[in-house]
Amino acid sequence: MEKNYPELAREAMNRRTFITAASASAAFAAAASMAGVALADDADKNADASKPHAEGSLAAANQAAGTANACYPTNDPNLFPPCAAGEGDIAFVAEPIADADIVATYDVDVVVCGLGPAGDAAALSCADHGLKTVAVEKRAIANYCSATLGGTNSKIHKHWGVEFDEAEWLHDAMVDNGFRGNFDLYKRYLECNGEAVDWYVDHLMKAGDKTEDDFPLTFNATGDFPDFRDPADATSLSRSWNTSFNLPFTPADLSALLPQLIEEAGAEVRYECPACQLVTDENGAVTGVIVKSAEGYEKYNCAKGVVLATGGYGFNLEKLQRCCRPRDLALCGWMSPSTGNTGDGHEMAVAIGGIEDEYPHSLMLDPMQLMPYLRVNKLGKRFTPEYEPYNHLACAIQAQPGACDYYIVDGAIADKIDAIWTPSSSCYGPKEVWVGAATSENALKADTLEELAELMGVPADAFVATIEHWNEMCDAGEDSDFHFPGAMMAKIDTPPFYANLEGAEALCTAGGLQVDIHSRVLNADFQPIQGLFAVGLTSGGMFNNTYPHNLNCLSHTRNCTFGYLVGKYLSGDES
Ligand SMILES: Cc1cc2nc3c(=O)[nH]c(=O)nc-3n(C[C@H](O)[C@H](O)[C@H](O)COP(=O)(O)OP(=O)(O)OC[C@H]3O[C@@H](n4cnc5c(N)ncnc54)[C@H](O)[C@@H]3O)c2cc1C
């Protein structure tokens, strides 16, 4: 069964790299460890640098884990050590692979490297367009994390009668990107996502004998807001666009189904066969790729091109530290299950002159708690209007001392949650789940605010003043500090009181290779490298500054759109 977000979050929390093995067995231990480390001002006095995960030795842990050596310095001694999703096996080979080591050579049109949603779409499109295509995947299975798709003008959106103002959508995208996003890529996305998504959905409809009715809009899917047809959820600060719809398959189904469709379309799929190195001619054009099978290195000569779709690099701590800020890596966990994501595609391209997005790269982030509960930082103060989209809230949390905060509820939250229950929150799970997460045995719990502050390790006077001020604003029906909607405000006045420590969680990395609108990888002169293409998280240009969750399901839809387009382009059909 597909796991819901809190389950994944809890698992991710238990996987956190900075928790000692002894304390990692329960999320409460994790939270207590996090609180003790992050919020106790004197904790570093007894730091033991030889034990990076020893209790209360955060600065030492940072040092031992290499924060001090990262490219980007931090002035916050309370940051957690940088955290990767795990340690994956890097397939990229930097040293030239000798001809004598090649055990087999093949001539094809295209090799697609990596079978996640982007590689799936690229390989399927290449095969659909009649190209002799091979898709190679590092692991024994393809990757699919979430059974959703989106866009702004597909037949599914028309079917449900929801329309989008694309100029407004584009404006939000530019703001989210801090105006550093590649405008051409966004425009291409807007022009083509309808055609690409329709093509993809047609494949899925045919494979599963489905109709448009089987693809509900994500905001409507759980039943609490079945008739919500607005283009955006107005109860979220900055628009949370109603662009995502659910696919009638589980992610596990899709990771099996897509390779099957690719093979039925005439392409070959090879598992446990990672791409390791690109082959170039004397002009620097890419002419093929070397993969590693159980037999040894095999070379593909590619008449049309090599498509890099190896995903991000969450399982490569060295690259994470090289390309991202320490503050962004001060995470409480990762949600990515794809151990193959070590940045092979990025490194293969860079090795032959490709360029990545400017550093530091951003991550796709969520806060641990998706409900807009009241938040305070380690100073006991509110710091953000809690109803902003998840990426914005996660960034606000990360900007706090120690890159973490507490979210606060009271003993009557089960009755009060109705006030903040919105389409964009309901789609991530029923109310009981969010109440349960806030009041679970993992939470700090006390009968008075003063006692709770002591458990949290925050200044009691500041914390109590924050809550009293909040309650006064609730009575007045207006948040004069951050303009949280008055109708959604609920007092914190019913003991027991609960506090949960939270940080940001990463789903995946969001920085990639710079590409043009045909997904051609660019060199340092911003010219396309002949024969080399990148799609999905291996490609860049669209997720600078932050990954825009509020443009719902943009990542999957970008995967689909540019995967589809690269097949068209390589076949010579550029229309
Ligand atoms: C829990 C979770 C939920 C998410 N939910 C959403 C959502 O609702 N909507 C959304 O838009 N996005 C969502 N995302 C993000 C989404 O998963 C990514 O956008 C997507 O997986 C990226 O696709 P990709 O094909 O670029 O990379 P991946 O899915 O990571 O696929 C890359 C593949 O390449 C393989 N590979 C790596 N190196 C090599 C190599 N050298 N040779 C061959 N193969 C290689 C990997 O093993 C992997 O299978 C979610 C992510 C997570 C973790």
Image (tube, rainbow, N blue to C red):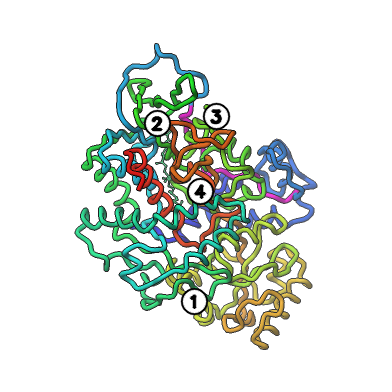
Callout 1 secondary element: loop
Question: Which residue in the structure is indicated by mark 4?
Answer: 508
- Residue 274, numbered circle: 2
Q: Position of residue 531 (x, y in %)?
A: 42, 31
Amino acid type indicated by mark 3: Gly
The residue to which callout 1 is attached is 421
Residue type for callout 2: Pro
Return the x and y of residue 433 as percentages of the image width and height: 46, 69
Q: Nearer the viewer, residue 463 or 160?
A: 160
Whether residue 506 sits left or right of residue 103 in the image: it is right
Q: CA distance from mark 3 to mark 4?
A: 24 Å
Quadrant in the picture for residue 405: bottom right
State how far apart marks 1 and 4 are (Cα).
27 Å
**Looking at the picture, how far across and down is residue 42, in whole percent?**
79, 53
Callout 4 crowding tier (Cα within 10 Å): few <14, some 14–19, many ≥20: many
Q: Which residues are magenta?
A: 77-92
Instruction: For ligand 1, tell me if the residue under mark 4 lies within 8 Å.
Output: yes
Would residue 34 appear left or right of 427 to someone viewing this image? right
Whichever of callouts 3 and 2 sits on the residue coming sooner in the sequence is 2
Label 2 within 8 A of ligand 1 by Cβ = yes
Mark 3 beta carbon near ligand 1 (under 8 Å): no
> Quick one: SS at disc 2?
loop
What amino acid is labelled 4 in the image? Cys
